[in-house]
């Protein structure tokens, strides 16, 4: 058992623009976060992951970086940043920064230089293809709609952008690029930050020649040609060897389209690459083959199969992260449980799952309150570049408004980006002026202030979950066994660590379901550590809709 602080920690993700405004401009900022540090401390989280706060023109809300070593002025100053870092450290918490190095902003000085001429020293910092305006280099589709290629007439060349055209991809084959990135990483690590969440890190190495995907009409996502590419492990090992190994930090790579077997190459104990990754397999259970907008109903048994497979494949040889939401995903309640009548039970149920599996749990801001998706009726109320581009693309293709909006309601990224719901005050206590993105009207029913002193709130439950994980290492290091893989409503699993045993049973349905437990365990010896409803009279009482129960037993120990 390879013990590490980042395995025993719980991470809280902050989307700074939407967390807390402190200077009355309707945009969240560093001062706002500083004012909420005690809230985070009381919640019990150990690490804060901050989405990008660097200087940026904000086409993609900070994932388009103009200057890696400056703070976006809307968010504050470097002094504010230092205060925030100290504030977290003083409270015994750590700070993880977003590292976005697959691409920069087109406003970054490197790209501005690169545009000047083919023989500018920075030209080779980016990825170019010679061509003519009428003939795209290949059929790859951008994640944000349209082609990945943008033509620059005065150069007679296209540049590659997997995301928006304001986010040109860096050329990792160029050693100067890698040198610049490593220098920048040291800049932040030397300030004392405690790690990096590495954006789209498995996109860095592209297939030579940028081949088109065969046998398809029109543009298509060409994942196989730019994810997990030929040199990706060389690049990650280089970052590890030349920078990361010198610091006691954590790294988590964002890696779409990675199976548990491939994950071992990124996070295997002996690999010297990353500590853990965000995998996306469980996020794809409600997407068809084309992309996430291809809506299909999710399959619970399939979902469990994925979750369990990741548990068992990485056990003992690598580490994973546990998440059901972030700033790119819709809110999880309506997606995996219920965001209506059983909203509170559902929020607690999903939290129970992510805090009782192997891996490091991530809480996305508002998840600890049970926040839900938003439905704005007008496309002009949406801010996300991916959503806005999708709407333009599909309406140009004749798809009716209602059909596009339906996709946005289910999968749009702004679902997760509406302002944090602090109180019943105007604008949910996020700001005292109209925020940059509309407040979800649900704030009157769902907000931190109301939940603060309510022992039955989602917030109180999350505090308990986090404490429970800290008290019982079986939840961190225990091995995992899925007891009922085929059951259409229940997820039931065991965790075992030495003389510690836990049995978790989760009802993912709106029906009452008869209790079940494995023959091998004598339930009389177990106590219920946690339940998201009033405690049942008997250990084996039927499970109420969306009920979660955690049983625990320790040989000879005090329980
Ligand atoms: O997301 C990477 C990514 O793969 C997303 O494009 C994902 O496909 C989509 O958002 C959800 O369907 C990262 C960041 O998390 C995201 O916010 C950025 O927009 C993107 O990279 C570009 O930096
Ligand atoms: Ca502000």
Image: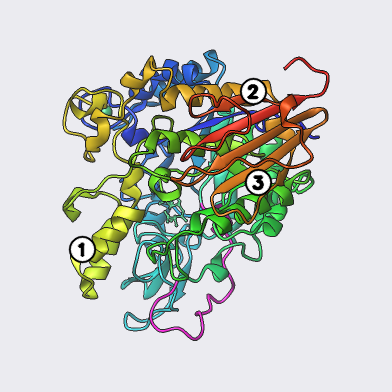
Separation (CA) of disc 3 from disc 1:
46 Å
Which residue bears the numbered disc 1?
Answer: 402
The numbered dot on residue 436 is: none
Q: Residue at x 46, y 70 (%)?
A: 221
Q: Which quarter shows the C terminus?
A: top right
Q: Residue at x 50, y 19 (%)?
A: 88
Residue nearer the viewer, 513 or 147: 513
- Mark 1 is surrounded, within 10 Å at the Cα level, by few (under 14), some (14 to 19) or many (20 or more) other residues, namely few
The reply, left or right, for residue 294 in relation to residue 250 is left
- Looking at the image, which residue sits at the far bottom? 215
Residue 553 visible within the image: yes
Residue 161 place in picture, x, y as percent: 42, 63
Residue 154 shown in magenta: no
Residue nearer the viewer, 326 or 500: 500
Q: Which type of secondary structure does the marked residue at label 3 adopt? A: helix
Residue 203 shown in magenta: yes
Which residue bears the numbered disc 3?
Answer: 239
- Mark 2 is surrounded, within 10 Å at the Cα level, by few (under 14), some (14 to 19) or many (20 or more) other residues, namely some
Q: Is residue 550 above or below residue 425?
A: below
Q: Residue at x 23, y 26 (%)?
A: 431
Q: Which quarter shows the N terminus?
A: top right
Separation (CA) of disc 3 from disc 2:
31 Å
Query: Magenta segment, principal secondary structure?
Result: loop
The reply, left or right, for residue 220 in relation to residue 7 is left
> Which region of the structure is painted magenta?
200-220
The answer to whether the residues at label 3 and label 1 have Cβ atoms under 8 Å apart is no
Q: Residue at x 36, y 21 (%)?
A: 451
Q: Which type of secondary structure does the marked residue at label 1 adopt? A: helix
Residue 93 place in picture, x, y as percent: 55, 21
Which residue bears the numbered disc 2?
Answer: 470
- Between circles 3 and 1, the one closer to the viewer is 1
In primary-sequence order, the first of circles 3 and 1 is 3
């Amino acid at each position: 058992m390879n013990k590490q602080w980042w395995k025993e920690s719980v991470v809280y993700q902050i989307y700074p623009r939407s967390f807390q405004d402190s200077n009355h401009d309707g945009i969240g900022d560093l001062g706002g976060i500083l004012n909420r540090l005690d809230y985070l401390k009381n919640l019990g989280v150990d690490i804060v992951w901050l989405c990008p706060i660097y200087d940026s023109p904000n086409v993609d809300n900070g994932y388009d970086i103009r200057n890696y070593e400056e703070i976006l002025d809307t968010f504050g100053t470097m002094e504010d940043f230092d205060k925030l870092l100290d504030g977290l450290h003083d409270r015994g918490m750590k700070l993880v920064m977003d590292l976005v190095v697959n691409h920069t902003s087109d406003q970054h000085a490197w790209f501005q230089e690169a545009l000047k001429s083919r023989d500018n020293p920075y030209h080779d910092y980016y990825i170019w293809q010679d061509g003519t305006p009428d003939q795209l280099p290949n059929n790859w589709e951008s994640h944000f709609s349209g082609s990945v290629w943008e033509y620059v007439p005065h150069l007679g060349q296209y540049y590659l952008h997997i995301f928006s055209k304001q986010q040109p991809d860096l050329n990792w084959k160029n050693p100067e690029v890698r040198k610049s990135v490593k220098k920048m990483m040291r800049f932040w690590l030397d300030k004392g930050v405690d790690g990096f969440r590495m954006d789209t890190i498995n996109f860095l190495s592209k297939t030579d020649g940028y081949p088109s995907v065969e046998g398809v009409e029109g543009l298509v996502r060409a994942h196989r040609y730019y994810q997990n590419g030929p040199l990706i492990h060389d690049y990650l090992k280089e970052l590890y060897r030349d920078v990361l190994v010198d610091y006691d930090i954590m790294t988590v790579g964002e890696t779409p389209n990675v199976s548990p077997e491939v994950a071992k190459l990124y996070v295997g104990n002996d690999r010297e690459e990353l500590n853990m990754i965000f995998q996306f397999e469980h996020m794809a259970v409600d997407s068809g083959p084309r992309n996430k907008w291809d809506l299909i109903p999710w399959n619970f048994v399939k979902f469990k199969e994925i979750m369990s497979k990741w548990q068992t494949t990485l056990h003992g040889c690598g580490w994973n992260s546990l998440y059901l939401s972030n700033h790119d995903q819709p809110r999880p309640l309506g997606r995996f449980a219920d965001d209506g009548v059983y909203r509170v039970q559902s929020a607690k149920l999903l939290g129970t799952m992510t805090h009782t599996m192997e891996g490091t749990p991530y809480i996305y801001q508002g998840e600890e309150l049970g926040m839900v998706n938003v439905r704005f009726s007008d496309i002009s109320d949406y801010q996300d570049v991916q959503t806005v581009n999708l709407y333009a693309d599909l309406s140009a293709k004749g798809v009716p408004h209602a059909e596009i909006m339906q996709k946005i309601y289910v999968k749009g990224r702004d679902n997760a980006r509406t302002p944090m719901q602090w109180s019943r005050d105007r604008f949910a206590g996020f700001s005292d002026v109209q925020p940059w993105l509309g407040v979800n009207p649900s704030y009157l029913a769902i907000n931190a202030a109301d939940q603060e002193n309510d022992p039955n709130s989602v917030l109180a439950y999350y505090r308990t979950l986090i404490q429970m994980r800290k008290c019982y290492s079986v939840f961190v290091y225990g091995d995992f066994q899925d007891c009922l893989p085929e059951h259409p409503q229940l997820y039931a699993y065991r965790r075992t660590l030495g003389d510690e045993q836990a049995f978790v049973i989760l009802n993912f349905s709106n029906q009452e379901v008869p209790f079940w437990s494995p023959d091998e365990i004598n339930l009389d010896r177990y106590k219920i550590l946690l339940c998201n409803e009033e405690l049942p009279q008997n250990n084996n009482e039927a499970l109420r809709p969306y009920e979660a129960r955690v049983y625990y037993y320790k040989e000879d120990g005090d329980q």
